[in-house]
Image (spheres, rainbow, N blue to C red):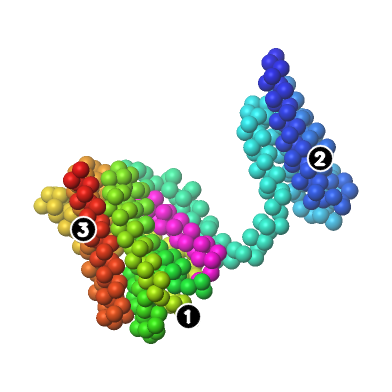
């Protein structure tokens, strides 16, 4: 017998039992018969000792504790119908048993259990008051998409040309939904009424194209807010650029590393131009329609995935007819309507080693140029000449800086 290991096991079991018991006792100090510090410490030690004798002994201890928990519940269910205390008793025994094999892991899980027990009121408020029914549904859909659907999809291509991988496309769907959820939570945390910057940035995760149009309508209706509306539209495009980087990284991490300089420079340019607009702009009395009330739109995420698949197939068809240049042309044209789909196509080409590092970087710059042209036209149409010129100038600066960074990197 190694006494050092034995003492470590018993110390970890005793510590986690005391911690869990202390939380339970503070929460139920006015209730007689509830398991507290001493009980949970003894339960953890019992689990550790029983595990030392083998699985059969641990099962006997668990059965005995389960009977004690049942008896405790039957005497207290009228005034406290919850089962948390009884379940905590069983968990403490199991953690004590785990301490026999991994004291560090058992101690860490003991802290997690204590936090969960302590956070009863905040968790109840979160689940009942802060999270709406719609947000709960969105969270469950996101969890199902990531943890149920994704593992079931094949990684192998399903088309004859070998470009459409269901698992890769679904990862993009999950990514878009997760980003939408994050933006929704952040916007709720700070409040849309804080001003156009928050509304603009998080609108971009839903649709930067729609954001450019809606903020253009605001600029046309309230000329005094034109600088702030321009800044909000540029921040929406910054969010779209960040989403592009995430999609590219999901398809081809090597392309994301290769294009880090142009994408980073483009993001910095947008942030600086938008910041200058905020210094000159005011706050809106009413905001244009921002992200939808739902955390994300599943149909929007699925549509982007379908567009990505369609653009990939078109790009592969053009590549077979005209070489890699044909695929690049298809992606560049697609960027005018959907930047993420075009970026995924370039990333797919990069993943198959069809492009050199220089071609990858300039391909992404071409996508930025295409989306700049399309959104500049939209900005003129939605917000008028002043709004269109300012938004177009900011987007042009984004593309120009990205091109400069790509040229500098290629020249080194």
Do the CB atoms of the residues marked 2 and 3 lie less than 8 Å apart? no
Please report whichever mark, 2 or 3, sits nearer to the chain's N-terminal start: 2
The stretch in magenta equals 169-192
Q: Which mark is residue 37?
A: 2
Spatial CA distance of label 1 from label 2 is: 55 Å
Of marks 1 and 2, which one's residue comes earlier in the chain?
2
* Farthest residue, direction top: 1
Which numbered circle lies on residue 366?
3
- What crowding class fits label 3: few (fewer than 14 Cα within 10 Å), some (14-19), or many (20 or more)? many
Residue 94 place in picture, x, y as percent: 70, 34
Residue matched to label 1: 286
Q: Is residue 184 magenta?
A: yes
Q: Is residue 17 left or right of residue 158?
A: right
N-term-proximal mark, 3 vs 1: 1
Query: What crowding class fits label 1: few (fewer than 14 Cα within 10 Å), some (14-19), or many (20 or more)?
Result: few
Q: Residue furthest left?
A: 322
SS at mark 1?
A: loop
Give the quarter of the image for residue 382: bottom left
Residue 365's spot in the image, x, y percent?
23, 56
Q: Quadrant of the N terminus?
A: top right
């Amino acid at each position: 017998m190694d006494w050092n290991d034995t003492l470590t096991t018993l110390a970890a079991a005793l510590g986690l039992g005391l911690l869990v018991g202390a939380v339970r006792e503070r929460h139920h100090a006015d209730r007689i018969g509830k398991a507290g510090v001493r009980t949970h410490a003894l339960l953890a030690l019992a689990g550790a000792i029983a595990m030392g004798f083998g699985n059969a002994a641990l099962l006997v201890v668990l059965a005995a504790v389960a009977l004690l928990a049942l008896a405790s519940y039957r005497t207290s269910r009228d005034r406290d119908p919850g089962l948390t205390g009884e379940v905590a008793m069983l968990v403490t025994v199991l953690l004590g048993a785990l301490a026999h094999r991994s004291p560090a892991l058992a101690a860490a899980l003991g802290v997690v259990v204590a936090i969960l027990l302590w956070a009863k009121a905040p968790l109840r408020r979160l689940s009942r008051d802060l999270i709406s029914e719609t947000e709960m549904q969105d969270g469950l859909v996101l969890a199902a998409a990531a943890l149920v659907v994704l593992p079931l999809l094949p990684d192998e291509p399903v088309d004859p040309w070998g470009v459409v991988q269901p698992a890769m496309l679904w990862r993009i769907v999950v990514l878009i939904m997760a980003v939408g959820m994050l933006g929704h939570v952040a916007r709720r945390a700070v409040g849309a009424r804080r001003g156009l910057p928050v509304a603009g940035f998080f609108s971009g995760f839903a649709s930067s194209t729609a954001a450019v149009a809606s903020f253009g309508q605001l600029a046309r209706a309230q000329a005094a807010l034109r600088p702030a509306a321009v800044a909000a539209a540029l921040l929406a495009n910054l969010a779209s650029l960040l989403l592009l980087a995430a999609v590219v990284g999901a398809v081809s991490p090597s392309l994301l590393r290769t294009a880090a300089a142009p994408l980073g420079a483009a993001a910095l340019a947008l942030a600086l131009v938008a910041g200058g607009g905020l210094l000159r702009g005011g706050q809106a009395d009413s905001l244009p329609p921002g992200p939808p009330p739902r955390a994300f739109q599943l149909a929007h995420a699925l549509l982007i995935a379908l567009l990505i698949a369609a653009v990939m197939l078109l790009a592969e068809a053009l590549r077979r007819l005209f070489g890699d240049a044909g695929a690049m042309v298809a992606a560049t044209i697609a960027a005018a309507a959907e930047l993420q789909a075009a970026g995924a196509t370039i990333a797919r080409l990069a993943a198959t080693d069809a492009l050199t590092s220089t071609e990858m970087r300039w391909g992404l710059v071409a996508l930025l140029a295409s989306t700049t042209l399309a959104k500049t036209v939209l900005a003129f149409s939605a917000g008028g000449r002043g709004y269109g010129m300012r938004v177009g100038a900011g987007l042009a600066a984004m593309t120009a800086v990205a091109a400069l960074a790509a040229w500098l990197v290629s020249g080194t």
